[in-house]
Image (cartoon, rainbow, N blue to C red):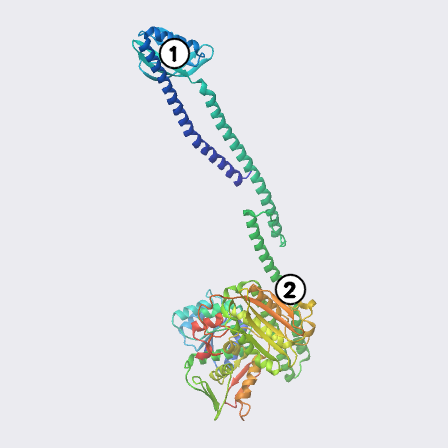
Amino acid sequence: MKVLLVEDNERVTQFVVKGLQEAGHTTDHAGNGREGMFLAASEPYDVIIMDRMLPGGIDGLAIIEVLRKAGKRTPILILSALSEVDDRIRGLRSGGDDYLTKPFAFGELLARVDALHRRAQSIDVETPLIVGDLHMDPLTRKVTRGARPIQLQPREFKLLEYLMRHAGQVVTRTMLLENVWDYHFDPQTNVVDVHISKLRQKIDAEFERPLLRTVRNAGYTLTADDSFR
Amino acid sequence: MMRSSALSLALGYVALGIVALVLFAAPLWYAWHVTIQEGRAEILQADAQRLTDTYRREGAAGLKAFIDARVGMQIAGERILLLTDASLHPLAGNLATWPASVPIVPGNYTIQVEIANQGNATALVHVAMVGPYNLLVGRYNTIFAPLETRFWYGLGAAVAVLSIAGLLIGLITRRALMSRIYSIRQTVSAIMHGDLQHRLPMQPHDDELNTLSRTINGMLEQIELLVHGVRNVSNSIAHDLRTPLAELRSRLEELALIRPPPEQAFAEIDGAVADVDRVIRIFDALLRLAEIDAGMRRSGFVALDAADLAANAVEFYAPAAELRNIDLALQAEGPVWVSGDPVLLAQALSNLIDNALKYAPRNGAIQVAVRKRGDGSAEISVSDNGPGIADAEKSKVVERFYRGDASRGTPGVGLGLSLVLAVAKLHGSALSLSDRHPGLTVAMTLPLEPSGPAVHALPDGPPGAGIIGPASLVAQVRVAGSGPASLVS
C-alpha cells in the first residue's frame, strides 16, 4: 500500500514512517501544506494521513476540501491535536474519512489506515463474508461455522460483521466503539473486551481453531491464518 | 463640562414645549382679535344707525340734543361722538376737531386719539353721512388693553415655567444618571483590575438602566464562571497529572539507572506507556469537561429518543453486568423525544451505569429508567442497590477528582460524576442523588421535544439495525460523506 503522510512534526513523522515501513507500506512524506497539496493532487496514493495544522499557509482541512472538489476519492485519515467533538465533526465534514487525535498509539493508526484502505477497495455490502469456515450472509443475517448455525444478538451480529469485513486486520477497541456502537468517547472500562469474549464463546468455543484473536496492546483480529503474528 | 445627553434632551423638550405653546396661542390670539374687532364694528354701526334714525325723525336739532344728552350721560373717554357740518365744523359731541387721519368716507377706521389726561389711546371709529352732516361714532380700545396684557403675561409665564422646569428636570436627571453611571464605572474598573466578584448596583424599581445592569451582571456571572472553570481545570491538571507523571518519571529514571535485562526492561516500558495513556485519559476528560462547562456544545443539540439512548447503553453494558451476575434492567416506554446532545448524553449515561456497576454488589440489581414527567420534561435515572452515598458526601462526589471511601481500589480517575453533572447542567438540569435504602438513584431531567425528530431516525426499526440512539452528528456526517463505515467496508 502506498501512503502519503502530510505532517510537520519530525518525531511523529519518523515514528509513523518507520512503523508503516515495518508493516510493509511505502510512505511519501510532505513537511508542509504546499508540498502536501502538490503530492496529494499529482501522485496516486491508497491512503493519505493528513495533519490538521500545517506550516506553509495551507491548512490540512483546506487541502482535503480542494482534493474532494477536484474529484479525488483517496481515503484520508485526519491526524490532529484538536480533540473536541466539534473539531472532529468539522474534520469529517470537510471530506476526511476518519479522525485520529494526537497523541495516538501506532497500532491505532495502522489499524485505521488498513481499515480505510480496505473500505476503499470493497464497497459491496451484499456478498457473503467468509473467514475460514465461518460464513455470514449480510442479507439473510445467517451465520454458520462449518455446518453449525450460530445464533447472534443483533449487536453481536454487527460486531462480527465489522470484524469479518476487516478480517486479517487489527481492529482496535476505539474502532469497535465507534463503528459498532457509535460511541465517540472512551467508556474507560473493558466493556468491549466483555462483548468480544461473549462473541468468542459463540463462534470459537467449541471449535479446534480459534478465529478471533487478541492482539496485545492493540485490539483484536479475526483471521483463519494460523501464522498471524 | 462634557456634553450631557440628559441636559440636551431636556433643553430640546423645553424648546418643543415653547413651540407648541406658540402654535396654540397664535391662532387663539388672532381669532380673539378678529372677533372682538368685528363685534365692536357692528355695535358702532348700530349706534350710527340709531343716530341717523333720530336725525330722520327729529331733524338736525333733535340729533344735536340727543348727542349732547348722550355725551352728558356717558363716562368720559369711553365713547367718542362727533357731529360736524360739511366743512367739518363741530356741531355736537365730545371731540374738539375732526381727527386728521379719518377720511370723510363712510367706513371703519382705527385711529390714535389724544384724551385730556390719559395720553394717547387707540380707538375704533365709524364714519357715516347723516344728511349734509358728517357723523363719527367711536369707542376706545382701552377696556381690552388689560385683557391683552394679561394674555401676554400668561403666555410669558407659561414659557418661563416650562423653561425652568425643563432645565431643572434635565439637571436632576443628569445628576441621577451621572451618579449611577459613576457607580457603574467604579464597578467596571474594579472588575478590570481583576476582581471578578463585583456586580453592578441594582435599583429596587426596574428601569432601562437597571435592565442593562442586569444583562451586564449576567454577562459577568458567565465570565466569572468561565474564568473559574479555567482556573479549576488548571488547578486540577496541576494537581492530578503530577501524580501519574511523577510515577512515570521515577519508572523511567529507574530503568535508566538499573539497566535491567531486556525482558524486564520491555515490561517496564509497557508500564510506562500505560502510565502515559492514563495521563492522556485524564487530560482528555478534563478538556471535555471544560468544553462542556463553556457551553460550547449546545450547538450539538438535536431531537433524540432518550428511551433508545438508554436501551443502547443498557445493551452495551449488559455483558459486563452479566459477568458479575448483576441484573441490569431497563424501564422505558419509548419513544421519548428530547432535545439534547447525543454524544454527551450517551457518555453521561454510560458513566452512570459504569459507576453503578462498580458499586452494586454481586447478584445486585441496576435499573435504568426513562419516563415522561408531568411538567414537559423527561427523566433519565440510574439506580443501584450498592452502598449508596452518605448525605455528607453527596455534594462532594460531583467535585472533580473526588473519590469516595468506597471507591478506593477501583479503577477510574474521579471525573465520572463531574462529567455527568456538567452534561446535566448543559441541558439545563440539576443532578439529583437520592437514597434507595440500600442504594443510590442518580437522575437528571431533559426538556421534551414536542415536535419529535426533524428527520425520522427509524424508531421502529429492528434494534441495532437503523440509525440508533446516539445518531450523533458524527454519524450523520459520515452518512453524508461516504456512508456508515460498517456498511461500506
Letter of the chain that mark 1 sits on in the rendering:
B
Q: Which mark is residue A194?
A: none
Mark 2 vs 1, N-terminal side: 1
* Residue B72 falls left or right of residue B370: left
Marks 2, 1: nearer the viewer: 1
> Is residue A217 at least partly visible in the picture?
no
**According to the image, label 2 marks what residue?**
B235
| Residue labelled with disc 1 | B81
Q: Are marks 2 and 1 on the same chain?
A: yes
Q: CA distance from mark 2 to mark 1?
A: 110 Å
* Mark 2 belongs to chain: B
- Classify the position of the N terminus of chain B by image quarter: top right
Is the residue B235 above or below the residue B273 in the image? above
Q: Residues within 10 Å of mark 1 (few under 14, many from 20)?
A: many
From what the image shows, is residue B434 above or below residue B267? above
> Callout 2: helix, strand or loop?
helix
Q: Secondary structure at mark 1?
A: strand
Q: Position of residue B346 (x, y in %)?
A: 54, 72
